Amino acid sequence: MQKSNLFFRSLFIIAVFLLMLIAGIIYRQLQMVKNSSKLVMHTYEVNLKMEQLFSAVKDAEASQRGYIITGETLYLDPYFTSLNNVKNYYNELKFMTADNLIQQQNLEKLNDLINTRFKLLSETLKLHIAGHNNDSLNSLLLKGENVMSDIRIHIHTMTQIENGLLDMRQKENDNQRSITPIIFLIVILFSLCIFILSYYQINEDANRLVKLNSNLLITNKIFEHAEEIACMSHWQWDLTTNKLTYSDNQYRLLGLEPQSIDLSLKAFSEFVHPDDRNILLERSKLAIKVGESPSAPYYFRVIRKDGELRYFKAIGKLTSDLHGNKILIGVTIDVTDQHLSELNLEEKNKELERSNAELESFNYLASHDLQEPIRKIQTFISRIIEKEKDHISESALDYFSRMQLSAHRMQKLIEYLLMYSRTNRTDQIFEYSDLNKLLDHAKQELSLAIEEKNATIISSPLPAIKVIPAQIQQLFINLISNSLKYSKDKVAPVININSEIVDSKDITELKNEPGRKYHKISVTDNGMGFEQEYAESIFLLFHRLHERSEFSGSGIGLSICKKIVENHLGFISAEGRPGEGATFNIYLLAS
Amino acid sequence: MTINHPQSFSVILADDDEDDRLFFREAIQDLNINASLVVVNDGTQLMSYLNRNDTILPKLIFLDINMPGKNGIKILQDIRHTDLLKELPVAIYSTSTSPKDVKSALDNGADVYIKKPSDYDGLKKILSKAILSNWRTKSSINTKDNFVLSL
C-alpha cells in the first residue's frame, strides 16, 4: 500500500508539472500570436508613416507651388509645418525601423533625398523671392521634380520591402493563429485524460474502501459474536489518561446491558467478590505506578447483577500506542464452567484416592488377617495327621485331608486375589529387563512342579524390554504352571517359548494402534488344549473351563496374566486345539 | 521359657501369637538340634532380654513383624542401632508376603526373610535350614534374590 501511495503521489506531481509546462507553452503561444500581430501592425504603421512623410514632402512642395503661383505668404505656412512634420516623421520612422538595417540605410538615403529636395525648395523660394528669371527657376523646379520622383521611387522600394516583411509576418501570424487552437485542444485532451485517470483511480479506491469496510464490519460482527460465545471480553486501559474501555460483552458478563453504566475500575470492583477486590486493586495500582503488569493470568470471583457467583480469569499485556503512551490491553474470560468441572475433577480424584487407600488397607488386611487363620488350620491339621494318624479312624483321616484341601484352596485363592489386586501400574517402576533371566527365575520357582511332571521347557532367546520385572516373572509363572496343570494324562509336558517382532498393522487386535512394533512372545504346550470358542472367556476372572474337583486352579491365574499384559500396554490372546495343546501369545511394546 | 538341653548356642523367637509359638517350639524339639530356645511375647520383652547382663547372645533371632507395641521392623532398627547387638543375625519370620514388608526388612538390616509355612513338615525344614546356616559371615552375601528363604 505504501508503495502504490508513493507511486500515485509522484504521478500526481508529474501531471501537475506537465500541466504547468503546457500552460507555459500556451502562454508563449499566445505571446507569439500577439507579437506577430504587433509586427503586422508595425509594418502597416511603417508604411503609413512613410506615406505621411511623403505627403508631408508633397505638402511642402504644394505649398511652395501655391506661393509661387499666388505669391500669398499664406501658402508658406503649411511649408514650414511640413518641414517640421517631415523632421518628426523621419525621426519616428528612424525609431520604428531601428531593427531593420537595410531600411535604416534606405532611410538615410531617403533623408538625403528629402534634404536635397528641401534644399531645392528653399533655393527655389529664394530665387522666386529674389525675382530671378524663369529659366533658373524652371531648371530648379525640374531638378526638384526629379528628386521627387527619386523620392517616390525610393519610398516605393521601402514600401515594397515593408510589404515583403508584411507578407512574411502575416504568414507567420496565420500559422500561429492556426497552431493555437490545436495546442488548446491538446491541453484539454491531456487534462481530460488526467481527470479520467484520477476518477478511475478514485473510483477504484472508493470501491476498495467500501469492500474493506464491509469486510471489517463483518469481521467485527464475527468478533463480537465470538466474544459472546466464548464468554469473554476485551478491554484496554490507557495508563496515561486513566481511561478504561470495555467491549460490550464485558457488560453482558456482569449481567448488564452493553455500555449501560460507566464501568470505571472502581465500578468494576463493586462487582468483584469482596475477598478478591484487594488483589485486583493492587495489581491495578502496580500497573499505573510502575507501568508494568505481570503477564500471568489472575483469577477472581465476581457477583453478577442477578446475584450469581461467577469465576473470572483476566490476562493483561502492556503495549504502547502511536504516541508512546503505555496502554494495558487484555481479556477477561468467564471460566466458571471450567472452574466447576475442575473442582468436580478434584473431588472425584479425592474420592479415587480414598477408595484406593481403602483398597490398599484391604490388601493389607487380606495379607495378614485372612491368611493367618487359614495357615494355622492347615498347620494344625497337618500336625494332627502326622502325630495321631495311628489313633484316628480312616474316615476321620479322610475328612481331615478334605479339610486340608479346602483350606489350601482358600489360601491359594487369597494369595491370587492379593496378587491380582496388587498387579497395578501406578506405583511400579519400569526397567530394562532381560526376559531370559525372568524366565529362569520363573522356572526356578516352579522347579518342584516341573520335576514332578517331568516337563521340558524350551525357549528361544528372548529380548530385553522395559517392563515391571516382578510382573513379567509372575506372567511366566502363571502361564507355565497353567500348561503344567492342563497337561495330557501320562504325556510329559513340553513347553515352547518363542519370540519375534511384529508390526501392529499385521495383528487384528492391535490394528487400532498407530504403526508400532511389538514383541510377540508365544508359549505353546502339548497339553489338553481347549475349544477355540472359549479363547476369550478363559481370561475372565474366576472363569473355569473344567470342574473344580478335576483341576485345582483358582480361575484367577489367566486373569492376572491379562492384567499384567495390559499394565504394559500390550495384549494377550490364546489359541486352543482340543486334544493337542494350547498357545498363548503375548504382545509387548518394543521401545 | 527356656528348654534345658546341653546347649552350644541359643535361638530366640519373638512372636505374639500363641499358636505360632507352639508350632515353633514343637518343631525345634522334633529337629533335635543342639540349641536352646528362648521365646518372648513381644518386642519389649525381647529388648529387655537382650539387654540383660547375663544373657548369652543368640545365634539367630526369629522376629515376627506384626506384634503389639513396637512392631518387628522397629525392633529390628533398635537392634541394629545398639552397639552390642548390631551384629546379631536376625530373621524376619512373618505371614506376610507383601513386597513392601520384604523390602522394609531388607532395608533395615534383616539377614533373611522367612514366610511362615502352612504345614508342619515345611516348618521343620525351613527352621532347620535357617538355624544351621551361618548368617553375617563375610562369605554370605545378602542379595535380593536369596533374601526370602526358600526350600
Image (cartoon, coloured by chain):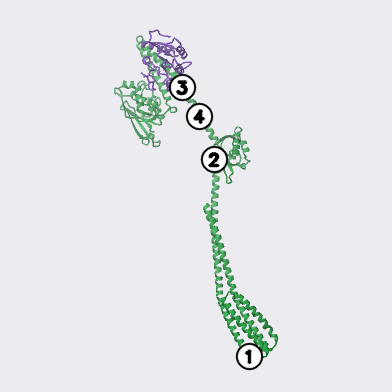
Chain colours: A green, B purple
Q: Is residue B6 left or right of residue A129?
A: left
Residue A390 sits in quarter: top left
Residue A166 seen in the current view: no
Of residues A455 and A285, the one drawn nearer to the viewer in this rendering: A285
**SS under mark 4:** helix
Amino acid carrying label 3: it is: Phe
User: Nearer the observer, disc 1 or disc 3?
Assistant: 1
* Dot 4: chain letter: A
Image height of B134 relative to A209, above or below: above
**SS under mark 3:** helix
The residue that disc 2 covers is: A229
How many residues crowd mark 1 within 10 Å: few (<14), some (14–19), many (20+)? few
Of residues A555 and B144, the one drawn nearer to the viewer in this rendering: B144
Of residues B147 and A439, the one drawn nearer to the viewer in this rendering: B147
**SS under mark 1:** helix
Q: Find residue A104 and report its horizontal and vertical position in percent.
A: 58, 77
Mark found first going from the N terminus, 3 or 4: 4
Give yes or no for contact between labels 1 and 3 (Cβ–Cβ under 8 Å).
no
Mark found first going from the N terminus, 1 or 2: 1
Mark 4 and mark 1: Cα distance apart in space: 160 Å
The residue that disc 1 covers is: A136
Mark 4 and mark 2: Cα distance apart in space: 29 Å
**SS under mark 2:** helix
Mark 3 and mark 2: Cα distance apart in space: 49 Å
The residue that disc 3 covers is: A362
Mark found first going from the N terminus, 4 or 1: 1
Q: Is residue A232 left or right of residue A78?
A: left
Image height of B104 relative to A280, above or below: above
The residue that disc 4 covers is: A348
* Dot 3: chain letter: A
